[in-house]
Image (cartoon, rainbow, N blue to C red):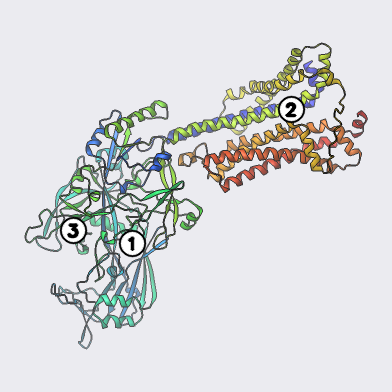
Amino acid sequence: MTMAQWRVRVRRTGAFVAMIAAAVAAFTLLTSAATAERLDAIGTVVANYRPAYDILVRPAGSRLPLEQQRNLVQSGQLAGMNGGITVAQWRAIQQVDGLAVAAPVSVVGYSMRTVPVEVDLTAQLDPTATQQVLRVQPTWVTDAGLSDIPDGAAYVYVTRNPLRQPKPARYTGQLVGPQEVSGDGTSVLVCAAGEGGPISPLAERARSSLTCVGGPGSIGYDGLPQATTAVLRLGWSIPFLIAAVDPTTEAALARLDTAVTSGRYFTDSEGPRPYSFPEPLSNPPVMAYDGVPILMADRPQLDTTLRLDVQRLDPAAVQLVRADPDQEKVRAALGAVPGTPVDRRQVTAQQVYPGFVDRVRDPAAHTGDLIYGDGIFNGSPLLGAFWTIGPARLVPDGDGLRAEAVGQDPKIWGTGSSMGDTAHAVPMELADLGVRGGIAVHHGLDRDPLVIGRTALPDVGLQLVGTFGPGKVDVGGALSAVPMDTYFNPGVTGADAASRQALGGATLRPNANLAGLLSQPPLMLTTMESVPLLLGDRDFNTQPSYPEYQLRPEAPISAIRVRLAGDLGIDPVSREKVRLAAARIAERTGLQVDITLGSSPTAVSVAYPEGRYGRPALTVAQPWVRKGVAVVLIEAIDRKSLLLSGLVLTVCGLAVLNATSAAMRSRRPELAILSCVGWPRRKILALLLCEASGSGLVAGAFGTALAVTGITLFGMPTDWRHALLAVPAALALTLLATLWPAWRATRADPAAAVRPAVALSLRRSRAPRRISTLALANLARTPGRTLLGAAGIAIGVSALTVLLAITFAFHGAVTGTLLGEAISLQARTVDYLAVAITVVLGVVTVADLVYLNIQDRSAELALFRAVGWPERLLHRLVTIEAVGIGVLGGTAGAALGLGGAAWFVGQVTAPLLWCALAALLTGVAVSGLSVLVPMAVLRRLPTAQLLAEE
């Protein structure tokens, strides 16, 4: 009997089998593809699971509230962490079982180092002029080109007449300078300087200069001939952050020993040693100091360019120079003299940086360009002073943070003089806005300041043992990067469209502004054995003298990076091992302990206030670290695969349920006759389930064949278990979709089923006057069927909304971490394939629903055609019905998808609304296309036969 039913209803049976076969084949292909991509994703997570260290230990109370709220670890804070962990606590951590490395880092402070920059102006001179004045305007370009910080102008007076400098008498209070001797023997005092007065080192008067260059026969105050070439010497200062590491543990953690590019690496337990250096200023000619070993970075990590604009001033400038010998007044007057631009040059930090390294490596070869100011030898090996800073002042601001401006006393950086050219040891970038407080200067002391005949000089110096390449240090993978501020600061990018546009897509990097938001990594490394000398109050005096600014020799360590022994995986046993180690460290030391295993970089938005020299207010994405991302991603991968598979199965079930319900409804008279002749309900139910089982088995066989063909065609990894599951899956899906309609069909009243349909209600209703109204009324006739079709569209549209949001609104990753962007929550091909399958099956459901409506109302439609309705009106009626189902399902699906996407983001944003609207329009469009097949059926309706049967 089952075979007979198949032969009688061959079209319906064929469509039914084809639908199930296609659904099962698509599900099998999707499962195979998802399994392959899941394995790839998990492989990526596992490969990036372990960062450079597993645990980060910081001083107690160093965690920001935002870190606690979002499970984050702040990056870029090392420069502001001035100790807080004792050596005893470090040793206690080393005693914890299961640890391989516990590497400390101790921030000492910033040392200002200065090198001369020579500017040859010979080519810019007027060869016809006897006397002339050039103006060189230095400008420090930084902040990705957004800030132009002007420095004091440098004036060069060039004369063909000789200049003769008498030996100055000390402390006379008179102006001292060279005499310009004319051809007739007369002389004029020019470029003379007095004692000057102390002013801010960032003031224009302290930084401007006037240099006089004479012709042949010029003699200096020492009686030696002077150079007659127009060469200007400017100073370029860079603050070098000094940090101390333990040589053995640092080599084990970051392989610093393999990153040495010249010289040698630290020896074990290497510390300060006594050295001597020829003193350039007074007798005795040798000065002794304790030199701390230094490894120096072989390249800068600063974003600074020196721009030099050269102008040839009008002849009035020459008269100003010769009319008044006081160069302080002359410099002020020359600022108003116009000039003609004759040259522009640029010097980068990369160009001058080798000079810094050379002067620390071999200071004796550069005694001629030592720059002395405020007791600091910036060009010598002596550590005359160093500066410490506090953390950036960050306050909560919406979902991110806001950096607040902090006022600075410029004299904390040193003292300038009104005589000019005295403050180039202070970087001009320090004049820009600062967001860090807690700035203190620590001046080097002379242990024997009362020795007669000896200049009081600092007793601590820097002794270069080698250089290292920051790029050669092992800082871990990019997807699992943890704070490695000892070697690297990646900078920040714009967090919003306005900031990205202002930066021009560039990265904002550190500069010489110590109080800025971004701090450079240490460019000088020393050993932990040197810390007691560098932080001891016997060798350095702190200003301001408040307790909170003092050095902390009793707790010098800023952070400890811990790596456990052995291999650690993502399994629960490994995670518990790390958790127990972290708990023991916290219990023994009372310090702040963060587990960084399985972490990944994430962006935290920070509002950076407007600078003073052109940089606009920016909202930047600062790279922090989110803890535990790897485990979350693995769980998300499994949830996503289960969700997409469930969506496909649900839509398949709805399509089959709709087809089964239609089949049962069309067979109600037949089933009623069987009931009338004595068939019990269970026998009828068994018949229907048997028919469905046969269809399911046939569909499973076809589905398996299609799945195997697709797996082979697309080159997917073959998992025959998934392919063989197609047969039982098809059978189970068919039986589940058939059970409810079949049970309802057996419960129907046989008499009602065989009795001709008559109207049971004479209630008058208003007749529809428009095609659209009639279409909506038709949908309302069978609400269950309409809702079934709308549900299929809703599922596909909701899934499409979420995927569009992931792709466009979240920039590819819901998690907001680098590892998350590379893994499963990134919108992938298999995800869109799953959504496409759900949408197609939803369309099939709508098409089948419209087809059934046409079949049920065939007599009605034939009557419309008989009374003169053109085909286009009938087509419009059917199309409006399909579009109505699409609007109903699409609206519900877009709302559900929008809610899910907004739950990930935390709010409804404009991009999310556009994604939901695009998915809704897609659902409506494909619903309208689903009427193509039903329209063909509509055209072939036998109008005369249907009217005769009525």
The x and y percentages for residue 768 are: 83, 41
Q: Quick check: 32 left or right of 791? A: left
- Tag 3's secondary structure? helix
Above/below status of 241 relative to 20? below
Q: Quick check: 523 left or right of 454? A: right
Q: Residues within 10 Å of mark 2 (few under 14, many from 20)?
A: many
Distance, label 3 to label 1, CA atoms, is: 32 Å
- Whether pointer 3 and pointer 1 mark residues with C-beta atoms closer than 8 Å, the reply is no
Q: Residues within 10 Å of mark 3 (few under 14, many from 20)?
A: some
Location of mark 2 (residue)? 659
Q: Nearer the viewer, mark 3 or mark 1?
A: 1
Distance, label 3 to label 2, CA atoms, is: 94 Å
The earlier-in-sequence mark between 3 and 1 is: 3
Location of mark 3 (residue)? 364
Q: Quick check: 623 left or right of 377? A: right
Distance, label 1 to label 2, CA atoms, is: 77 Å
- Whether pointer 1 and pointer 2 mark residues with C-beta atoms closer than 8 Å, the reply is no
Quadrant containing the C terminus is top right
Closer to us: 82 or 52: 82
Q: Residues within 10 Å of mark 1 (few under 14, many from 20)?
A: many
Closer to us: 17 or 609: 609
- Whether pointer 3 and pointer 2 mark residues with C-beta atoms closer than 8 Å, the reply is no
Q: Which numbered tag is attached to residue 431?
A: 1
Inspect this view and state whether residue 130 appears: no
Quadrant containing the N terminus is top right
The earlier-in-sequence mark between 1 and 2 is: 1
The x and y percentages for residue 391 are: 33, 49
The amino acid marked with disc number 1 is: Ala
Inspect this view and state whether residue 549 appears: yes
The x and y percentages for residue 233 are: 28, 68
